[in-house]
Image (cartoon, helix red, strand yellow):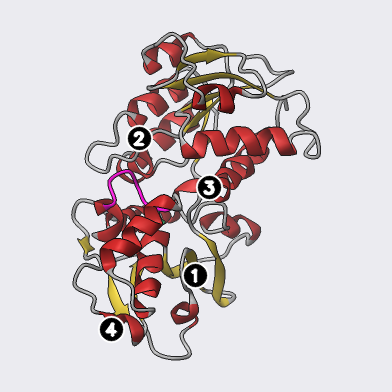
Amino acid sequence: MTMAKPRIMILGFGMVGQGFYELFNQKRHSLGLGNVSISEIVDAKFGHIIEPCENIISEVKGGKTFPKIDPVKAISESDSDIVCEFTWLNLKTGEPAYSHIKTALGHGKHVITTNKGPSALKFRELNELAKKNNIQFKMKGTVMAGTPSFNLLELLPGIEVKSVRGIMNGTTNYILERMVGGKDFNESLREAQSLGYAEADPTNDVDGFDTGAKIVIISNILGWNHDFNKMNIEGIRKVTREQAANGTKLVAYADRNHAFVKPVELPRGDILREVNGVMNAVEFETDTLGKIYSMGPGAGRIETAQSALTDLVSILKNWGN
Ligand code: HSE
């Protein structure tokens, strides 16, 4: 590893990858990261880009491509120190992101991911591998994009979380709000897709699996054992306009013994009832502070890129120590 000048590899140069590239270059000097570089990008469509130039986004948008490479081979041979995994969501096997992350951690590279597949399905194995190799496996962007969620607990030493409740999917929350305004379900979904909120396969949003993955990831971090494949998950397909108008939201809940995702009619006065559109919110019920909340956008290009920047700064804090 090159300790003096950290080098970053980006895997997946779609919406989030490009957003991160842009945000990193915009903020690196004000963050004191002038010595950090994005040295490589690997993307299924654009190929293997070594030492990308500043206007790489317009180049690939204009049709420029680079030599293709197997991403696992690229990771194994790379001299990068940090791998940012931004490929597509697969909640069945976690692939291809699972293999990418496992390879990177196995080669002693820190990993930042926004991919919920490996973080929900393979957390323990990947976390153990990271610990064994004394490196970090960071996944802030998997829950509520750049808005603080589980990471705010790092500010609260010793706190015990008793339960977690939240609205953690921007697409469905956006659709429900549009339905209240009289819009059709499918039209609202198309809008959410064009705004970059929905997953490549929007079934993951609409049927609650994306939210399920997020509550499992928080549970994993808290050391609660909930199995994504066994938990009760119900999406918003059956929610009527009238129910949406009466405060029905797609709610995720977990405590040590239970976890579920389902539409719930929230009473007036419940803070979560006021969370609209792409906004997400999480409530932690704790031993010392009672209920604490975080609310903010849960999806979007730059909003998700912020999470990777947060993870990057956290990894670099102790660089070389
Ligand atoms: N599809 C997700 C959402 C993106 O709508 O919230 C962020 O995980």
Distance of label 3 from label 1 (alpha carbons): 22 Å
**Visible residue check, residue 5:** yes
Residue under the image location 46 percent in, 25 percent down:
105
Q: Quarter of the image holding residue 70? A: top left
Distance of label 3 from label 4 (alpha carbons): 30 Å
User: Which corner quadrant holds the C terminus?
Assistant: top right
* Residue position marked by numbered label 1 in the rendering: 284
Provide the residue span drawn in magenta. Answer: 197-202
Residue 285 higher or lower than 19, as above or below: below
Under mark 3, the amino acid is Thr
Closer to the camera: disc 1 or disc 2? 1
* Residue position marked by numbered label 3 in the rendering: 304
Q: Tell me the crowding category of disc 3: few under 14, some 14 to 19, or many 20 or more residues within 10 angstroms, Cα based.
A: many
Q: Which of 130/11 is in front?
A: 11
Under mark 2, the amino acid is Glu
- For marks 2 and 4, the one nearer the N-term is 2
* Residue position marked by numbered label 2 in the rendering: 125
Distance of label 2 from label 4 (alpha carbons): 41 Å
Residue 294 higher or lower than 268, as above or below: above
SS state under label 4: helix
Q: Tell me the crowding category of disc 1: few under 14, some 14 to 19, or many 20 or more residues within 10 angstroms, Cα based.
A: many
Find residue 243 and name its label: 4
Q: Are marks 3 and 1 in contact (CB under 8 Å)?
A: no
- For marks 1 and 4, the one nearer the N-term is 4
